[in-house]
Each structure stands twice: as structure tokens, then as C-alpha cells.
Image (spheres, rainbow, N blue to C red):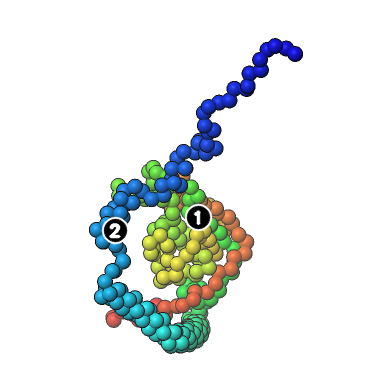
Amino acid sequence: MCGMSQQPPERSTRAAARPDASMSLLTNVMDHSLDDGYAEAAERREAQGQSGLPRTLRAKLGLAAGLVLAALVVTVGAAQAREEAPAVAKEREELIDRIERETDAADRIEDQVDELRADVGRRQQEALREHGGDKAALVALLSGATEVTGPGVKLVVDDASGSASSGGGPRESSDFSDNGRLRDRDMQHIVNGLWQTGAEAISINGQRLTSLSAIRAAGDAILVDNRPLVPPYTVLAVGNGGRMNSKFKDSADGRYLNALQENFGIRTAMSVEKDLRLPAAPSLAVRNAEPRAGEGTS
């Protein structure tokens, strides 16, 4: 046997490390969930006899009375709400029925107005045909009382597709900020130019123009006889299409439209058409003409 003495294995004298030693912050939070300051304040109040709960019989009775009163108020409010619910539902149903009745009445009145307007239009057209004499057809055409068909030109005008452009142009002023939209005065130039080049009848988006038609604006919208139009604007003009096309492009109003296209991005497309159909005007304003005193009639 070997004479070497066997030494016992060395063991560490340090205490085993806690498995949660690396989570000291989390451990501290779990072990001290209540802040030390709050804990000290609670201990002081308890030592001084200042607990948050009432200690005397009178205080306890007061707290109980308050709780009972609060419960009573909640109970009474809930009961009243249950009692008023059917009444509120009934009033709502009555209001809905009333709205439906009034809506039906308004629809019936609107239908009557449309019928009366159509009847007035027919009577006006009959009066024009009866008293127009040899020029009855011409009077009906100029007044817009009849539908018109024939050759002519079709002009489609639309707002600019991009952002507002700047630069000189026929409608620029020092205080005018253009946004590429067609204006009512632009439409007036277009219509007047077509009349001057020989148009016999004109319509814009199906709205027939007469000698008394007005083109105005309401905000950014263009109105024809107080009816709003939506772009793109389709202008139909009955007449000699080839001649109207060339004369309009060479006219001052045609150059005005071309300047709008170049300077403001207004989009235009003009074509000669063989067959156009323009509706009659929705309403007519019939006026009587009388000769002046002392002047004969021709």
C-alpha cells in the first residue's frame, strides 16, 4: 500500500449563492411591495389612533346612513329609468311616424309641382305655335320651346387635372389665386363665342339655353338658370359644324379658351358632329311685346 496520506477533498466555505441573485431588483420589489414611506406613515397614524375607519358608534352610524342613502338614490334612479323607458320608446316611434308622413306629403307635393310645371310648359309651347304666325317655328326655336336636332359642334371643357398653375392669362389679377377650375365668366365667353359663330341652339350638360338664360356662379359651381352643373362641361351647339369650328377657333373667344388651356391647364376637346339632339328648355318665360306709342308696326 502506498504510504501517501489521502487528503480529504477541499470544500468551499462560502455559502451557496441564491438562485435569484441575478434578479435583485425584482426580488426587492416583491419583498417590499409597500413603499417604506407609506408604511411609516401608516404606522404613525395607527399609533396616534387616526385610522381611516370610524371608531366611534356615532361615526359608524353616520357612515352606514350615508351608504344606505346612496343605495336608495341608485335604486330610485334605476326604477325611474325602467318606468320612463316605454314612454321614451313610444315618443320615438311617434316621431319616426311623423317624419315618414311629412316626407310622403313632401314627395306628393313635389310630384304635383312637376306635373304643373310640365303642364305650363305644354301650354306655353301651344301658345307659341298658335300665335307665332308664319314665324312660329323660329319663335319656338329661339325661345327653346321645342327639341332641336341637327349637325353642329361638340365642345367638352374640363377643369385642370393637376395643381393650380401660375402665370399670365386672360383672367389674371393681382388679387386672384387660380386653382385650375373653369369659372362662370369662362363659360360665358364660350357660349357667346358659339352664338357669334352661327349657333342656332346651345345646351350645356343637357341644360338648354334661351335668350333669357343666365350663367352665374355659386362658390366654385357654375349655374345655368340656377341649376348647378358638374364638370366636365359638354357644350352642344347646333348649326353649320364645319364653319362654326373654324370660326370659333379664330375668334377672340376661341383664343380666350386656348389661353385658358395653355396658362391654367383647362382641358378642351372640340369636334364636328353630324347629328346632335338638344332638349327643350325646362321652363319658358313668355313676354308680350307692344309697339311704342306713335310708331307703326312692320
Measuring 38% from the left and 50% from the top, which residue is drawn there? 34
Left or right placement of residue 74 versus residue 151 in this view: left
Mark 2 packing: few (<14 Cα in 10 Å), some, or many (20+)?
Answer: few
- Residue 24 vertical placement versus 236 (above, below): above
Q: Nearer the viewer, residue 261 or 93?
A: 93
Measuring 30% from the left and 63% from the top, which residue is drawn there? 52
Residue 194: % across, % down: 48, 59
The residues bearing labels 2 and 1 have C-alpha atoms spaced at a distance of 84 Å
Q: Which mark is residue 46?
A: 2
Mark 1 packing: few (<14 Cα in 10 Å), some, or many (20+)?
Answer: some
Left or right placement of residue 54 versus residue 164 in this view: left
* Mark closest to the chain's N terminus, 2 or 1: 2
Point out the image quarter for the N terminus.
top right
Left or right placement of residue 175 versus residue 266 in this view: left
- Residue 71 vertical placement versus 168 (above, below): below
Measuring 46% from the left and 38% from the top, which residue is drawn there? 24
Amino acid of disc 1: Asp
Residue 87 can be seen, yes or no = yes
The kind of secondary structure element at disc 2 is helix
Left or right placement of residue 282 versus residue 53 in this view: right
Measuring 39% from the left and 81% from the top, which residue is drawn there? 75
Task: From the image, tell me which residue sits under label 1.
Answer: 158
Amino acid of disc 2: Glu
Q: Nearer the viewer, residue 2 or 87?
A: 2
Residue 198 can be seen, yes or no = no
Residue 123: % across, % down: 49, 86
Select label 2 or label 1 by which is in front. Answer: 2
